[in-house]
Amino acid sequence: MSIYCPLAEALGIPTNISILDIPEPDWECVEQANLKSIQSSHVQKKLIEEGRHRFLDRDLQSKNGKIGYEKAIESGKHHSLQPSFRKIASDRIKKGTHNFLDSENQRNNTMKGIQNGTHSSCRIHTCPHCGKVGKGAAMKMWHFDNCRSRK
């Protein structure tokens, strides 16, 4: 049984690899990742014991969020008050792609985008800082302006 991978195909990597041909993971790296996870959980437990963990005070969280929202509205900097946001929203409503429209329409548009390869999760991006190639939101989250290699 072989795996089809459009990213591998785009990069010129053979796609007729059998699942049995996939190399064994580097267990030392796996152990290091597990150790980091355990260390992180100890830090989180310590914050909880000290009462400083950010998820302990729900009122404070919602209060901070509400204060930030109110400040943005008052100063006129909230994204929904920007003219460009309103134009984009009205254009999306006209096209039928706005996220507040019915879910059936939204699902159809998403499937069309995936089939055409135009959906955001299908586009292949290359980070200009480290050269990493990948797809979807994870690339935007960890690379480009947030890349470790950025100078």
Image (spheres, rainbow, N blue to C red):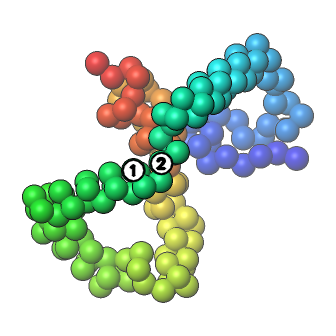
Which quadrant is the C terminus positioned in?
A: top left
Q: Is residue 66 left or right of residue 121?
A: left
Q: Which residue is mark 2?
A: 57
Direction top: furthest residue: 28
Q: Name the kind of residue labelled 2 in the image.
A: Asp
Residue 5, placed above or below residue 25: below
Q: Secondary structure beneath disc 2?
A: loop
Of residues 17 and 78, the one nearer the viewer is 78
Image point (16%, 68%), residue name: 81
Image point (65%, 24%), residue name: 42
Q: Alpha-carbon neighbours of circle 1 within 10 Å: few (<14), some, or many (≥20)?
A: few
Disc 2 to disc 1: CB gap under 8 Å: yes
Direction left: furthest residue: 75
Q: Which residue is mark 1?
A: 60
Numbered label attached to residue 49? none
Residue 50 x/y as whole percent = 54, 29
Asked where in the image residue 101 lies, by quadrant, the reply is: bottom left
Of residues 145 and 4, the one nearer the viewer is 145
CA distance for labels 2 and 1:
5 Å
Image point (65%, 34%), residue name: 13
Residue 25 x/y as whole percent = 79, 23
Q: Is residue 117 left or right of residue 23?
A: left
Camera sees residue 22: yes
Residue 49 x/y as whole percent = 60, 31
Q: Name the kind of residue labelled 1 in the image.
A: Leu
Image point (10%, 58%), residue name: 75
Q: Secondary structure beneath disc 1?
A: helix
Residue 17, placed above or below residue 81: above
Asked where in the image residue 20 lies, by quadrant, the reply is: top right
Q: Is residue 137 left or right of residue 39?
A: left
Q: Is residue 12 left or right of residue 1?
A: left
